Image (cartoon, grey):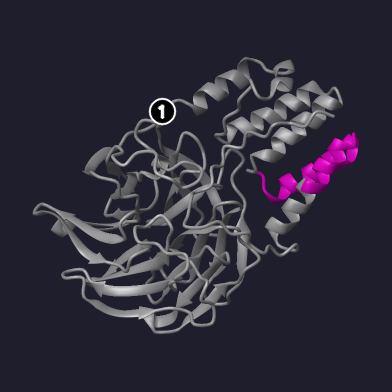
Amino acid sequence: MKRLILTSTLIMVLVATAHAQTVDPASDLGRFRTLRGDGMTALDKGDTATALDDFDKAQAIMPDSPSIPLLRAQVFLAQKRKPEARAALLDYLKRGNQLDLAKNTDFNAVWNADLENQLQLNQTPVGDMEGLTALKGFNIVEGLAYLPDQQQLFLTSIHDGKVIVLSPEGARDVINFRPGVAAYGLGLRDGTLYAATVHSRLTQGYDAAKPINSKIVAFSAADGKVLRAVSDPAKKDREFGHLLLGRDDLYVTDTAHGEVLRLTGYGDTLETLIPEGYMDSPQGLAENADATALMVTDFTSGLYRVDLTTGAMARLLPPADGNLLGITSLSRYGNDLIAVQNGLKPNRILRLHMSADWNQVDSVELLLRSPKLLSQPTQGTVAGDEFVFVADSQWSNLDDQGNAKSDTPAPAVIGVIKLKP
């Protein structure tokens, strides 16, 4: 049987290095991958009944997977069940995905006006943003912190390993890390900046022969004076990513192991909150108002809720037409979450309307979708009734090998979206 060319719209964010995470086969992600793999094997052998059963079970685990509805559509076509194939494709498109019919010509047999209209709708710009500022030069902007009252915007520059502040007085460097070290996460609390640093091959001065441990570095926002640094001596190969300055504790992701760590009471010892095996690439973090629940987004498998009292974790399912994959940043706005979703093309900014206890995503609202305004957006923060975020990070200036396409790319852009309570 002809193998379907999967045109997944999930585009993995390029990070410092690539890692193959150890995934627990009993986890949601592990079970999903096993079922999908078994189904594809059965499909290749022409056993469409077994393939469909496996794909149905996989879809129950991860309804917003971009691959499963396409595989189900292929099975239905093989079984000459055109209405079911069309329904599977419509489910795929209603979640915001794209489809290249030139590469998947089998689907032409069931393509109709409803599918075409939905495909075109997914490419239509939605919403608008204001440009807060732009940063010239080649920077690769990832982390962001904002003081609106003082009109100070702090940004991490991956390319040259700096944290920069932009203000009405102009731009200045707050801190320069060691050669080859950059900050991927940034947060501001009571005049102190916290940066999650990593040894990055994308940063000037990188030397693979001289590895440098990832650290949580606390330094003065006023003059860049380092106040303290925390690392994990037990695992020197950690690669810290996003961080969250919670009410009581600090949280940081580790992309090397797919873990989430906690610095309890902003102390000196990192502990593992979410161990390796559940997530492929943990990204955004958000804490509810009373600091009893932590939300973590895994780029590959979606949204997870952690009970900070018991440590229990559960993965949240998307609404019927929602897509929670490919999210790289979370920020709380009231009881809702503002999400940066650069794993879909065109990239999107979402508002996730949450249940009161954060046990369910009630609905997904599309705030902004625009190939013109968004180019690999990264992180953001809520400031009052505004969402301030990196709209064009310059990640798109890198090729698939991580090499710069241009030494003088278009400026990195910081955007603002007005929010309504």
Magenta extent:
37-63
- Horizontal side, residue 105 vs residue 233: left or right: right
Q: Is residue 310 visible?
A: yes
- Horizontal side, residue 269 vs residue 169: left or right: right
Q: Is residue 152 visible?
A: no
Callout 1: SS: loop
Q: Is residue 31 above or below residue 209?
A: above
- Residue 364's x, y, as percent? 50, 43
Q: Nearer the viewer, residue 134 or 410?
A: 410
Amino acid type at mark 1: Pro
Query: Residue shown at 47%/43% (left/top)?
Result: 342
Q: Is residue 147 above or below residue 403?
A: below
| Magenta-colored segment: predominant secondary structure | helix
- Residue 302's x, y, as percent? 58, 52
Residue found at the very far bottom of the displayed protein: 268
- Image quarter of residue 234: bottom right
Residue under circle 1?
125
Q: Is residue 39 magenta?
A: yes
